[in-house]
Amino acid sequence: MDKNPQDAYEQQEGSQRELAKRFKVSPNFVRLLLKRHQTEGTVEPKPHTGGFTSKLANQLNLIEQLVEQDNDATLQELCDQLDQQVQIRVSPSTVCRTLQQLNLTRKKNSARQSS
């Protein structure tokens, strides 16, 4: 396996620009990698720090109950119920992603869709 740009640079196998071409990365990446090694002593990737947590993360049980009570509710109706019950306003797509995360499916009522 090929070494990393930092090791190659320390062994004087080329300039930063040459190493960038060799490892198919930008010269700026090599510069930042060397700077990180110098300041932190490592070139290992930093751990993932997460991202935004869902507004519904603490409401999963409630969502399950709402779907159980009214399996025919539209996503917008579920949004409205969440707003009424816990004052959380979310988009239908957020509710859809949460339902997918919970592996919940809603029953489609064909009579309702035609009206």
Image (cartoon, helix red, strand yellow):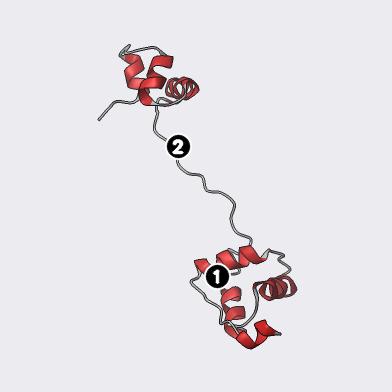
The quarter of the picture where the N terminus appears is top left
Q: Specify the label residue 99 is tagged with.
A: 1
Disc sitting over residue 46 in the figure:
2
Query: x, y (%) of residue 23?
Result: 37, 25
**Residue 89 location, x and y as percent?**
72, 65
Type of the residue with mark 1: Leu
Residue in view at x 71 percent, y 85 percent: 115
Residue kind at label 2, given as amino acid type? Lys
From this view, report whether residue 6 is shown above or below residue 109.
Answer: above
The answer to whether mark 1 and mark 2 are in CB contact below 8 A is no
| Nearest the eye: 102 or 59 | 102
14 displayed left or right of 101: left
Residue placed at 40% from the left, 21% from the top?
21
Query: Regarding mark 2 in the picture, which secondary structure is present there?
Result: loop
Query: As drawn, which residue projects farthest toward the left?
Result: 1
Relative horizontal placement of residue 102, taking residue 115 as reference (left or right):
left
For the residue carrying disc 1, how many other residues have a C-alpha within 10 Å: few (<14), some (14-19), or many (20+)? some
Task: Find numbered disc 1 in the image and state the secondary structure of the residue it sits on.
Answer: helix
